[in-house]
Image (cartoon, rainbow, N blue to C red):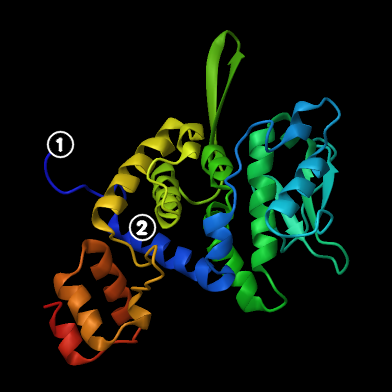
């Protein structure tokens, strides 16, 4: 097809993902993201799941090691689905799980039904571990962990699981009629995950990453389109060479240039910067009129 490649997501979503991903780099650095393995649902990465006696705790220990924690840093508490257990008020939740640190070993509480879906289990445990590594003792870090939760799984090489688990379709027959149920995990849709994974791959220099084949089709298609877009245009607020194009780190002249000459995503980022009051001078606002 002729013409400039197009980004598969809305500029506002793209700008939001770019900015949040940049904040993860600020927090954790680039090295782990660039060199870390991307986990896949195979025996090579999760040999215990292919054994009859595996438990969710086995998976959690492996994931702890992957994100740079000791294998026993976070425990797993399994509750029977029908036993009437309820999460305590104020706990953070993700797809039937919750994370809490009661003063001793942090714990992830899950229902036993998750063991019947190992890929979703990995996604949920990975999400809660991503929350754990992003959290510290103060409220600002807790807020940060919630804002970047799903992107944090991509950043730590768990994105294939979280992307594939964000939508589940289950079918059953009731009174001779086929019924389908859909359940969502988190706030990112397939296209958002596709772009986030493409950004991750582009920053790592992966034009045709092997993990692309493991994605569900509704994530793989926008991911392929976004990879093509990023490798052709380089249009992102953060760059593989370490350049940071976020407006908060730009001069007033650079912000004006983003508004006048930048891509749609650049303009969205610059407008957000102006709206937040960091660049409210009249000559900058004038470029919007």
Label 1 – label 2 distance at C-alpha: 25 Å
Looking at the rendered structure, the secondary structure element under dot 2 is: helix
* Residue picked out by circle 1: 1
Quarter of the figure with the N terminus: top left
Residue visible at 64% across and 38% down?
A: 120
Quadrant for residue 73, please give it.
bottom right
Pinpoint residue 6: horizontal percent, then vertical percent.
Answer: 22, 48
Q: Position of residue 46 (x, y in %)?
A: 71, 36
- Name the side, left or right, on which 208 lies relative to 73: left
Between disc 1 and disc 2, the foreground one is 1
Within 10 Å of disc 2 (Cα), the crowding (few <14, some 14-19, many 20+) is some
Q: Position of residue 172 (x, y in %)?
A: 60, 18
Report whether 234 appears left or right of 182: left
Q: Residue 285: give its label.
A: none
Residue positioned most to the top: 176
Q: Is residue 58 above or below residue 133?
A: above
Horizontal and vertical percent position of residue 35:
56, 55
Asked if residue 243 is positioned above or below residue 66 in the image, the reply reads below
For the C terminus, the quadrant is bottom left
Mark 1 secondary-structure assignment: loop
Q: Residue furthest bottom?
A: 281
> Considering only vertical position in the picture, is 57 above or below 44?
below
The residue nearer to you, when weighing 176 against 132, is 132
Residue depicted at 86% across the width and 69% down the height = 103
Residue drawn where x is 68% and y is 56% of the image: 67
Q: How many marks?
A: 2
| Sequence-first tag of 1 and 2 | 1
Q: Which of 149/251 is in front?
A: 251
Labelled disc at residue 13: 2
Tag 1: Cα neighbours inside 10 Å, few (<14), some, or many (≥20)?
few
């Amino acid at each position: 097809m002729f013409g400039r490649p197009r980004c598969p997501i809305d500029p506002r979503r793209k700008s939001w993902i770019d900015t949040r991903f940049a904040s993860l780099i600020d927090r954790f650095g680039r090295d782990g993201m660039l060199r870390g393995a991307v986990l896949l649902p195979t025996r090579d990465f999760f040999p215990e799941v292919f054994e009859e006696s595996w438990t969710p705790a086995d998976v959690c220990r492996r994931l702890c090691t992957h994100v740079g924690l000791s294998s026993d840093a976070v425990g797993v508490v399994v509750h029977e689905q029908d036993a009437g257990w309820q999460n305590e008020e104020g706990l953070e939740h993700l797809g039937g799980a919750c994370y809490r640190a009661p003063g001793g070993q942090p714990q992830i509480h899950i229902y036993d039904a998750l063991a019947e879906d190992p890929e979703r289990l990995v996604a949920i445990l990975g999400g809660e571990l991503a929350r754990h590594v992003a959290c510290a003792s103060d409220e600002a870090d807790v807020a940060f962990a919630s804002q970047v939760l799903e992107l944090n799984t991509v950043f730590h090489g768990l994105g294939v699981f979280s992307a594939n688990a964000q939508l589940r379709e289950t079918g059953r027959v009731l009174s001779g009629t086929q019924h389908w149920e859909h359940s969502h995990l988190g706030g990112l849709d397939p296209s958002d995950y596709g772009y986030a994974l493409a950004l991750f791959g582009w920053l790592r220099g992966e034009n045709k990453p092997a993990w692309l084949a493991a994605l569900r089709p509704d994530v793989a298609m926008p991911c392929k389109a976004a990879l093509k877009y990023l490798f052709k245009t380089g249009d992102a607020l953060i760059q593989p060479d370490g350049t940071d194009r976020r407006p908060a780190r730009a001069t007033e002249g650079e912000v004006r240039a983003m508004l006048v000459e930048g891509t749609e995503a650049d303009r969205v980022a610059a407008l957000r910067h102006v709206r937040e009051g960091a660049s409210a001078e009249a000559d900058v606002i004038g470029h919007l009129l």
